[in-house]
Amino acid sequence: MATLLFGSLARADELDSSDTDLLMIALENETRRITAGHLSLFLYPWQTLKKNAREGDLFLCHLVREAKPLLDPNGYLPRLQDAFQYRSDYMSDIAWAADLGWYLARFGTELNSNLLAKRVLWCIRTILIARSANRRNPIFAPQLLAEQTQSSAGKELLLRRHITRRDAELRKLLRLFLEEETSPDRFNNQADQTAFIERFVVTSNKVALQTIQQEEQSQIGYS
């Protein structure tokens, strides 16, 4: 068992409204995320983390570069750092984030505001983090990522990410970022929701599929 701190608190660049991100490493085969207020707790099996580190997973890159051990008597963090190997490239992560971003820009009216805001920021950060990982100089801090984009919309969302915005403004800024920082094709601009979801399945876009599932569950809760 181990508990690691990562994110803004680990980097010491947190704001009053920043979340506390904790990862708990367990031996049992269970992966979960628990959110309560400004606390996000991730539960991961050790074998999954070790496998993902060897495969160059972007989340593992984040952990091995920035995490701080709060409790790690068996040295799991240094073992992950030793196991981590960069992938040849992170273009698939960029494609996943861009696809979800276009889905949100066009169909995000169906998401609740909190989930939309989180996913918009995830899309922008993932695209920029993946590009920095391609250069073998991964950057995770939002204020540093803002220096990596020429998009004024991207800078605005990164640097003022804790401001509550209307959904329409969020989606407009996201679309501007995607138009400036990605290469949108006919699919992005013309595909319907069903086609997007089919693409998420075919490309194993886990975050996109989880987003749709979360929204469906929240709608059931309101019915």
Image (cartoon, rainbow, N blue to C red):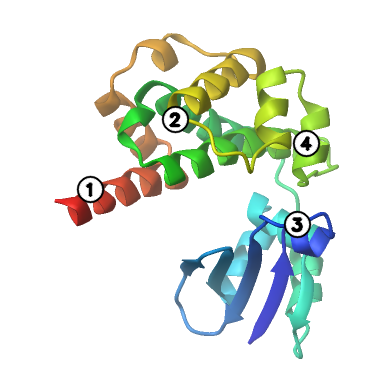
Q: Are marks 4 and 1 in contact (CB under 8 Å)?
A: no
- Near mark 3 (Cα within 10 A), the count class, few <14, some 14-19 or many ≥20, is some
Name the kind of residue labelled 1 in the image: Gln
Left or right of residue 171: residue 78: right
The percent coordinates of residue 71 (x first, y second) are 74, 85
Q: CA distance from mark 2 to mark 4?
A: 23 Å
Q: Would you name the residue on which mark 4 appears? A: 145
Looking at the image, residue 20 lies above or below residue 177:
below
Q: Disc 3 designates what residue?
A: 8
Location of mark 1 (residue): 219
Q: In the picture provided, is 130 more to the left or to the right than 198?
A: right
In percent of width and height, residue 32 lies at 46, 69
Which residue is the site of mark 2?
Answer: 167
Question: Which circle's residue, 3 or 4, is located before the other in the chain?
Answer: 3
Which residue sits at x=58%, y=67%?
A: 39
Left or right: 82 in relation to 102: right
Task: Find the distance from the CA under tag 1 to the CA under tag 2.
Answer: 17 Å
Mark 1: secondary structure: helix
Q: Residues within 10 Å of mark 1 (few under 14, many from 20)?
A: few
Q: Residues within 10 Å of mark 4 (few under 14, many from 20)?
A: many
Q: Would you say the residues marked 3 and 4 are in contact, meaning their CB atoms lie under 8 Å apart?
A: no
Mark 1–mark 3 distance (CA, rounded to whole Å):
32 Å
Label of residue 90 in the image: none
